[in-house]
Image (cartoon, helix red, strand yellow):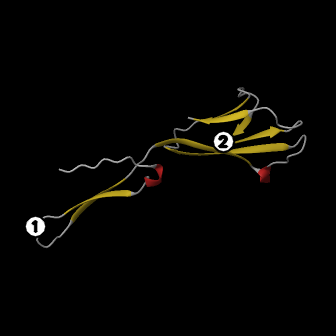
């Protein structure tokens, strides 16, 4: 039995790893092979952007942020938006949040995925 050790990356998720064997007793068959798909789990990577197509960036307008999360498994990711540490000031719609602009957005908001 032979072993192989390596650290897979998220880019290798879904790719196949194969083991190939040959032996003189395999007369007509020169190589036997077995493969398995890689199921790579990785923590969330978060990207936040302003959705300009759904925002009106003027005083009294609407500002929509979108959060893109890349993680595996994605089903277990919980998204939470906060404004200066307070969740109650934000109305969320899945991975986006809309804010009414009263002057300029100067306070800090954060988005966590865990």
* Count of labels in the image: 2
Q: Which mark is residue 12?
A: none
Quarter of the picture holding the C terminus: top right
In the image, taking residue 38 as reference, residue 60 lies left or right, namely right
How far across and down, in percent of the image, does residue 75 sit?
52, 42
Q: Which residue is mark 2?
A: 94
Q: Nearer the viewer, residue 75 or 64?
A: 64
> How many residues crowd mark 2 within 10 Å: few (<14), some (14–19), many (20+)?
few
Q: Is 17 situated above or below 93?
A: below
In the image, taking residue 110 as reference, residue 78 lies left or right, namely left
How far across and down, in percent of the image, does residue 93 sit?
70, 41
Write the residue at 20% across / 67% down.
31
Furthest-left residue in view? 25
Write the residue at 44% across / 49% down.
9
- What is the quadrant of residue 113 in the picture? top right
Q: Please tell me whether mark 1 sits on a helix, a strand or a loop.
A: loop
Q: Please tell me whether mark 2 sits on a helix, a strand or a loop.
A: loop
Is residue 58 visible to the viewer in this orientation of the structure?
Answer: yes
Q: Is 71 situated above or below 26?
A: above
Write the residue at 11% across / 71% down.
27
Q: Which residue is mark 1?
A: 24
Q: Is 97 situated above or below 8?
A: above
Mark with earlier residue (2, 1): 1
How far across and down, in percent of the image, does residue 92 sit?
71, 37
Write the residue at 12% across / 67% down.
26
Q: CA distance from mark 2 to mark 1?
A: 59 Å
Furthest-bottom residue in view? 28
- Residues at discs 2 and 1 in contact (Cβ within 8 Å): no
């Amino acid at each position: 039995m032979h072993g192989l050790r390596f650290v897979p990356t998220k880019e290798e998720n879904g790719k196949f790893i194969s083991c190939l064997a040959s032996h003189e007793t395999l007369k007509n068959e020169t190589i036997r092979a077995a493969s398995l798909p890689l199921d790579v789990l990785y923590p969330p990577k978060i990207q936040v952007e302003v959705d300009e197509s759904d925002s009106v960036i003027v005083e009294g307008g609407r500002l929509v942020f979108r959060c893109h999360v890349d993680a595996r498994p994605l089903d277990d990711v919980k998204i939470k938006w906060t404004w200066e540490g307070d969740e109650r000031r934000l109305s969320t719609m899945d991975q986006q949040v809309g804010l009414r602009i009263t002057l300029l957005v100067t306070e800090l908001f954060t988005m966590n995925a865990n």
